[in-house]
Image (cartoon, rainbow, N blue to C red):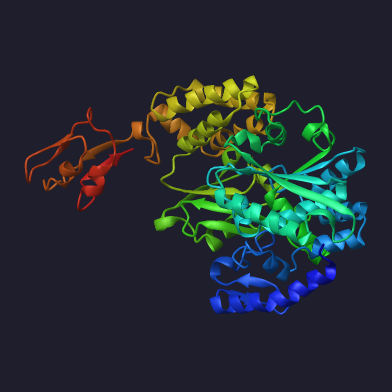
C-alpha cells in the first residue's frame, strides 16, 4: 500500500527525469510555477486543463503522471476532506458536464450523495460517437490516469466503491492504455482496497461499447452495462437516484473527470478565474472540416468562434470564404458567418440555436451546401436511432426523405413547412436527447440559410454547386479541342474532333467533375449552378 510520503518520493525522483526528456525534445516550455506547456502559435490562445498532460507525459508510465502532481489531489481529498466538503468545492467551482448537457457537476454528485444506499456507482461515459470528434479519445490515449483519479475523487464524495468506464471498442489504443493504467494504479494501491491507508475502497472496470451511438445517452449506456440492448429508459427517476441496477449512479464524460483533479490541485478560485461566470473553465473542441489547422483545441469558455476558427485554426483552406461552423456534433446547429463573433459558452450557443455538445466543431466554406449538410447529419441520426420511440424512429426518416427530395431537385414548396412541423414534433416528443436534438441541423439551416432551400426548390439549383443532381457540366466556346476532358471522362460521354469544340452528352454524364479537373486552362469545362 502506497503512502503520501511514497507519492512525494516518486515525484521527486521522476520530475527531473521528465523535465530532462522534455527539454531534449525541445517542444515545451517549463514555467517558473512548474507548469509545462507546449510551444507553437497553435497553442498561444489555448489554456489546457483537460489536455494539460497530453503530449507531455508517457501515458504508459504512472510515475510520470505522479511527477506532474498526479494522484496528489486524490490524496488530499482522502486525507484532509470529508465527502461533503468535496461536493461543496465542486459546486463552488461551477464545473458543468462537458458531455453536452452542461449540468452542474457538483449538484449531480450531491444528489447521489444524499441518497442512502448499500451500493453506489461512478460511470465514465467514454462512448464518443460524434462524426469528426476525438476529444475523449485523446485524453484516454494520452492521460488515462487523470480520468481514473477524477473518478476516484467522485466515488469518495458520493460513497461509491465501484466505477465503470464505458468506452468505444473502436478505440483499441485507448482501451489498452486504460487497462494498463488501471493495472498500474492497482499495483501502487491507488485503486483497490484501503487507498492510501484511508479505508476508502474504489475499483474500476472497463465495459466496451459495440458502436451504437445511442449508448452515449446515459440510460441507454446503463442498459448496455447491465447486459441489455442499449435503449433509453423512460426517465421516471434520475440516474443519481436509480441508475445502474437501480442504485444511485453518477455519469460524467471523460473531459469532465479530467477536470476534477486539477480543480483540487489548483483550487476553486483558480478554476473560476478562467472562462465566464456561468460557464467557468475551458472546453475542448475537435476543430475539423475546411480549416487550415485542424486538431484539438482547448480554450477558456467565452472565447469567440472567430478566435477559434481564424486565430487558432488559421481560417478556411485555399482562401475560400468562410460560410458556417457547426458545433455540437450531429445534434448541433449550423452557425452562419455573421455570427462568427459569438462567445463559445453554454448560454451564448443556446441563444442562437446551437449547442456545446461534447465538442465537435466543423468548419464549412463557400463550397458547402447547407441543405446537404443538414441531410448528412440527419442521415447519421436516422442510422443511429434505436427505434424505441415513434417521433425519433419515424419522424427523422420522414425528414430525411424530404431532404433527399430537395437535394435531388424534386423539392416542393410545402416541403419547408413540412420540415418545420416535423422538427417541432420530433423535438417535443422524443424520449431521449438523441431525438430531442436530432432536428437542430435542419432548424438552424432553415433559420440562417433559408435562401438555399428556396434555391433548391424553386430554381432547382444548388448555390454551392455541391448537390450532384442539380449540377450540370458543359463545355464553353473557349474549348481548343485538346481532348483532355474526353480522355479523363470515365463514361466516355464527351465527343468532338481534335481542335474542335467538344460536347458533353448530358444524359450519360455522371457529374463526377473529372472533365473540369482535366481541362488545362480549367475554363472550358465549367459547372452550371
- In the picture, the quarter occupied by the C terminus is top left
- In the picture, the quarter occupied by the N terminus is bottom right
Left or right of residue 476: residue 279: right
- Residue 105 lies, with reference to residue 312, above or below; the image says above
Between 108 and 56, the residue placed more toward the observer is 56
Left or right of residue 373: residue 437: right
Q: Which residue extends farthest left? A: 498
- Residue 367 lies, with reference to residue 405, above or below; the image says below
The mark tally for this picture is 0
Between 108 and 15, the residue placed more toward the observer is 15
Q: Is residue 60 visible?
A: yes
Q: How far across and down, in percent of the image, does residue 158 sit? A: 87, 46
Q: How far across and down, in percent of the image, does residue 82 sit? A: 93, 55
Q: How far across and down, in percent of the image, does residue 234 sit? A: 75, 25
Instruction: Name the residue located 53 percent from the left edge and 57 percent from the top edge.
Output: 295
- Residue 413 lies, with reference to residue 504, above or below; the image says above
Instruction: Name the residue located 29 percent from the left edge and 41 percent from the top edge.
Output: 527
Q: How far across and down, in percent of the image, does residue 197 sit? A: 88, 60
Left or right of residue 127: residue 258: right
Between 451 and 495, the residue placed more toward the observer is 495
Instruction: Name the residue located 81 percent from the left edge and 50 percent from the top edge.
Output: 202
Amino acid at each position: 500500500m502506497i503512502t503520501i510520503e511514497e507519492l512525494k518520493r516518486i515525484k521527486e525522483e521522476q520530475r527531473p527525469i521528465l523535465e530532462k526528456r522534455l527539454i531534449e525534445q525541445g517542444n515545451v516550455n517549463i514555467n517558473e510555477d512548474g507548469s509545462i506547456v507546449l510551444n507553437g502559435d497553435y497553442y498561444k490562445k489555448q489554456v489546457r486543463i483537460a489536455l494539460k498532460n497530453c503530449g507531455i507525459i508517457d501515458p504508459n508510465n504512472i510515475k510520470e503522471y505522479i511527477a506532474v502532481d498526479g494522484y496528489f489531489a486524490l490524496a488530499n481529498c482522502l486525507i484532509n476532506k470529508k465527502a461533503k466538503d468535496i461536493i461543496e468545492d465542486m459546486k463552488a467551482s461551477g464545473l458543468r458536464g462537458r458531455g453536452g448537457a452542461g449540468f452542474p457537476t457538483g449538484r449531480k454528485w450531491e444528489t447521489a450523495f444524499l441518497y442512502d444506499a448499500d451500493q453506489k456507482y461512478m460511470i465514465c461515459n467514454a462512448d464518443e460517437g460524434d462524426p469528426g470528434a476525438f476529444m475523449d479519445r485523446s485524453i484516454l490515449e494520452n492521460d488515462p490516469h487523470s480520468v481514473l483519479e477524477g473518478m476516484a475523487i467522485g466515488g469518495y464524495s458520493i460513497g461509491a466503491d465501484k466505477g465503470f468506464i464505458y468506452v468505444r471498442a473502436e478505440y483499441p489504443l485507448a482501451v489498452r492504455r486504460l487497462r494498463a493504467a488501471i493495472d498500474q494504479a492497482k499495483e501502487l494501491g491507488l485503486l483497490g482496497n484501503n487507498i492510501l491507508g484511508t479505508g476508502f475502497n474504489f475499483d474500476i472496470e472497463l465495459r466496451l461499447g459495440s458502436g451504437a451511438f445511442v449508448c452515449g445517452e446515459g440510460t441507454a449506456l446503463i442498459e448496455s452495462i447491465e447486459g441489455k440492448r442499449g435503449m433509453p429508459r423512460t426517465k421516471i427517476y434520475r440516474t443519481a437516484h436509480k441508475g445502474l441496477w437501480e442504485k444511485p449512479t453518477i455519469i460524467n464524460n471523460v473531459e469532465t473527470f479530467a477536470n476534477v483533479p486539477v480543480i483540487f490541485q489548483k483550487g476553486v478560485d483558480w478554476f473560476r478565474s478562467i472562462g465566464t461566470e456561468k460557464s467557468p473553465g475551458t472546453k475542448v473542441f475537435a476543430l475539423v472540416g475546411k480549416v487550415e489547422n485542424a486538431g484539438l483545441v482547448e480554450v477558456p469558455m467565452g472565447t469567440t468562434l472567430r478566435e477559434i476558427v481564424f486565430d487558432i485554426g488559421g481560417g478556411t483552406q485555399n482562401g475560400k470564404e468562410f460560410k458556417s461552423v457547426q458545433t455540437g456534433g450531429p445534434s448541433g446547429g449550423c452557425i452562419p458567418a455573421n455570427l462568427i463573433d459569438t462567445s463559445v459558452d453554454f448560454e451564448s450557443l443556446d441563444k442562437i440555436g446551437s449547442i456545446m455538445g461534447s465538442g465537435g466543431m466543423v468548419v464549412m466554406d463557400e463550397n458547402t451546401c447547407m441543405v446537404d449538410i443538414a441531410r448528412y447529419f440527419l442521415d447519421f441520426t436516422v442510422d443511429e436511432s434505436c427505434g424505441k420511440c415513434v417521433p425519433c424512429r419515424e419522424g427523422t426518416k420522414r425528414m430525411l426523405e424530404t431532404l433527399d427530395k430537395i437535394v435531388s431537385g424534386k423539392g416542393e414548396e410545402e416541403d419547408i413547412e413540412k420540415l418545420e412541423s416535423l422538427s417541432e414534433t420530433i423535438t417535443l416528443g422524443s424520449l431521449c436527447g438523441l431525438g430531442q436534438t436530432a432536428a437542430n441541423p435542419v432548424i438552424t439551416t432553415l433559420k440562417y440559410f433559408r435562401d438555399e432551400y428556396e434555391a433548391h426548390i424553386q430554381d432547382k439549383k444548388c448555390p454551392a454547386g455541391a448537390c450532384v443532381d442539380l449540377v450540370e457540366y458543359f463545355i464553353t466556346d473557349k474549348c481548343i479541342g485538346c481532348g483532355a476532358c474526353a480522355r479523363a471522362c470515365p463514361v466516355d460521354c464527351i465527343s468532338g474532333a481534335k481542335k474542335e469544340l467538344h460536347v458533353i452528352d448530358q444524359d450519360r454524364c455522371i457529374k463526377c467533375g473529372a472533365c473540369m479537373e482535366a481541362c488545362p486552362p480549367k475554363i472550358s469545362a465549367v459547372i452550371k449552378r
